[in-house]
Image: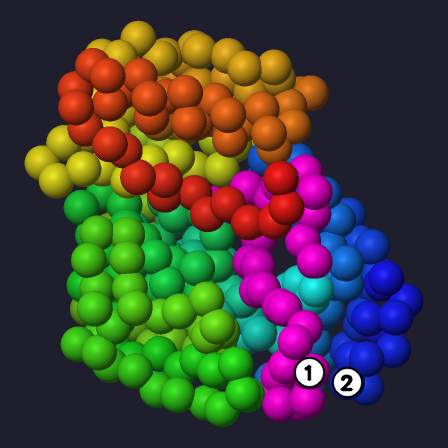
Amino acid sequence: MSSSLLDRLPSVRGRYLANAPLKHQVWFRVGGEAEVLFKPEDLKDLEFFLKNIPIDVPWVIIGVGSNLLIRDGGIPGVVIKLGKNFTNLTVEGTQITVGGGALDRTVALEAAHRGIGGLEFFVGIPGTIGGAIKMNAGAYGTEVKDCLVSCKTLDEKGNVRTYLPSELGFAHRHSTIGDREILIEATFVGHQEDPKIIQERIEILLDQREKTQPIRARTGGSTFKNPPDQSAWKLIDAAGCRGLRKGGAQVSEKHCNFLINTGEATAKDLETLGEEVRKRVLDSSSIALEWEIKRIGVR
């Protein structure tokens, strides 16, 4: 099937990989294969691909897989993964413009180096800028919506669109950027500040994260969104789920809004455990937790 799909795809300058294992592309280290994995050479290559891919061929974009669960049956069609040519970063005054494939952490550290305060929260967000904007990611009381100036996407036809924050419908871990749009660039603004002071704050945040989250485990970050005026981890803890296991999957003892792969988990183990947590929280508090982790692929 992959061979016949490859024959139908546009002739690009980037790389196609058939039957590509995806578990090493995500932090959970689980999941099946991509029918085809596409790594575009640059923006023009990606535009060409989107303008010429057959309309019946499905595609999905992934980042570094920090908040993603790929199911065991893999992903049919094409999985797009952006490379180094989508990570460029420029600074003008107190504004930073960065490619959608750049790491959130890179923005925080570069801003600190340049004496731009207000963006250090990015150091606490695993993943790429594209994913951070799509889900209005946040940490330590600050969210993307608080510092975004504008962003650019490619739509499913390969056309560039520019958005202002007011056009993105930002809410808690939500924006209106759809799954058929690929975020290619964003501009953020901070304020001028002593680089040493910013770096000190970053080190405090990193130390806090190390102490409170299982960042060295195979995890996917926060599993569920915080309900209004509630903390998901407190609801999970109150429902008796701390340390709960299913196969090789476990609710973290350190922070119970994190699921971890103890070494032999399958994607089914993790998703089943997550649904059991949701059921127990609903039974104990009448609150239905919503998944924050994105789950894609065939079960």
Within 10 angstroms of label 2, few (less than 14), some, or many (20 or more) residues? Answer: some
The quadrant the C terminus occupies is: top right
Q: From this viewpoint, which residue is outermost toward the right? A: 3
Q: Which is nearer the eye, 293 or 288?
A: 288
At horizontal 73% and vertical 55% (from top left) the residue drawn is 34
Residue 200, disc? none
N-terminal of the pair, mark 1 or mark 2, is 2
Numbered range of the magenta stretch: 47-76
Residue 53, disc? 1
- The image position of residue 289, as x and y in percent, is 27, 33
At horizontal 69% and vertical 20% (from top left) the residue drawn is 264
Query: With respect to residue 37, does 222 lie above or below?
Result: above
Q: Give the residue pinned by disc 2.
A: 10
For residue 294, side relative to residue 289 (left or right):
right
Is 215 inside the magenta-drawn segment? no
Q: From this viewpoint, which residue is outermost toward the left? A: 229
Residue 117 can be seen in this image:
no
Mark 2 lies on a secondary structure that is loop
Asked if the residues shown at circle 1 and circle 2 are in contact, with their CB atoms under 8 angstroms apart, the answer is: yes
